[in-house]
Image (spheres, rainbow, N blue to C red):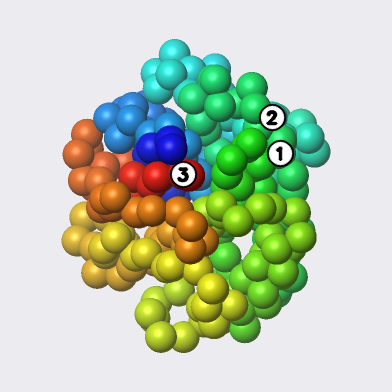
Amino acid sequence: MTVLRIASYNLHKCRGLTGPHAPERNLAVIAALKPDIIALQEVDFRYGARPEALPRALIARTTGLVPADITGRTGANSLGWHGQTILMRPDLADEAVVRRLPLPGIEPRGALVLRFPTLTVIGVHLGLARSSRRAQLARITAQASRIADDNIVLLGDFNEWRDDRGLESLAGFRVIAPGPSYPAPMPRFRLDRIAMSQHLTLRRHGVFTGAGAREASDHLPIWAEIVVP
């Protein structure tokens, strides 16, 4: 068995709540969180050529992690695809196979799929409309059953305000909302979630508030320790 510390963090383009652009704050949060794998959202600026908001040159030096090797990033100077990437330990990156999964909806969205020998990790940033989120989760779960084995983790910013609506396609998963993660200074809403397939074991989970996380983004990161058989 393997124990992994996984996490998800919406960086809000490294601007905190209102600016200025200060990626060193987000990197300090990630370093203090000490994840083995972390799905990130809003790692690129939104307009124009979508240049990276989180400088890739600082990631390994600050956190010890490396970004997924994404073929076909959003732009030539983007870090991610549709604003998303996944960071991981270098030894895990050597084993990872990365796949992009386009998603339906009113606005362009996509999921990142990382396949490891014993685990598949899917990072998401779902749409703002519930109809889009439902369609996106239906696409993800349908594709996951085709491309992955039993051990699947789906995590990210689900943008879902309710616990009883919009998540119907995850009926076969254990859905974990560790706690309110938005807005970061005084969190009230559980927008960030983790969904696990049934053969994975959850040890612990939480919302991370250390290392200046309340000022670094409009979301707080969430984390979980899981056991992979």
Report the side of 61 relative to 47 (left or right): left
- At label 2, counting other C-alpha atoms closer than 10 Å, the crowd grade (few under 14, some 14-19, many 20 or more) is some
Viewer-side residue, 181 vs 43? 181
Report the side of 112 relative to 56 (left or right): right
In terms of secondary structure, where does tag 3 sit? strand
Query: Are dots 2 and 1 in contact, CB under 8 Å?
Result: yes
Report the side of 140 relative to 60 (left or right): right
Q: Quadrant of the N terminus?
A: top left
Give the residue pinned by disc 1: 98
Q: Is residue 151 above or below residue 106?
A: above
Q: Quadrant of residue 174?
A: bottom left
Report the side of 207 relative to 69 (left or right): left
Give the residue pinned by disc 2: 69
Residue 95: image location, x then y, percent: 65, 27
Q: Is residue 134 above or below residue 189?
A: below
Say which amino acid is labelled 2: Asp
Work out how far the residue at label 3 is from the one at label 2, CA to CA, in angstroms: 23 Å
Say which amino acid is labelled 3: Val
Give the residue pinned by disc 3: 228
Q: Nearer the viewer, mark 2 or mark 1?
A: 1
Residue at 46 percent of width and 44 percent of height: 228
Say which amino acid is labelled 1: Val
Viewer-side residue, 11 vs 160? 160
Query: Are dots 3 and 2 in contact, CB under 8 Å?
Result: no
Viewer-side residue, 56 vs 6? 6
The answer, for residue 15, to whether it is visible in the render is no
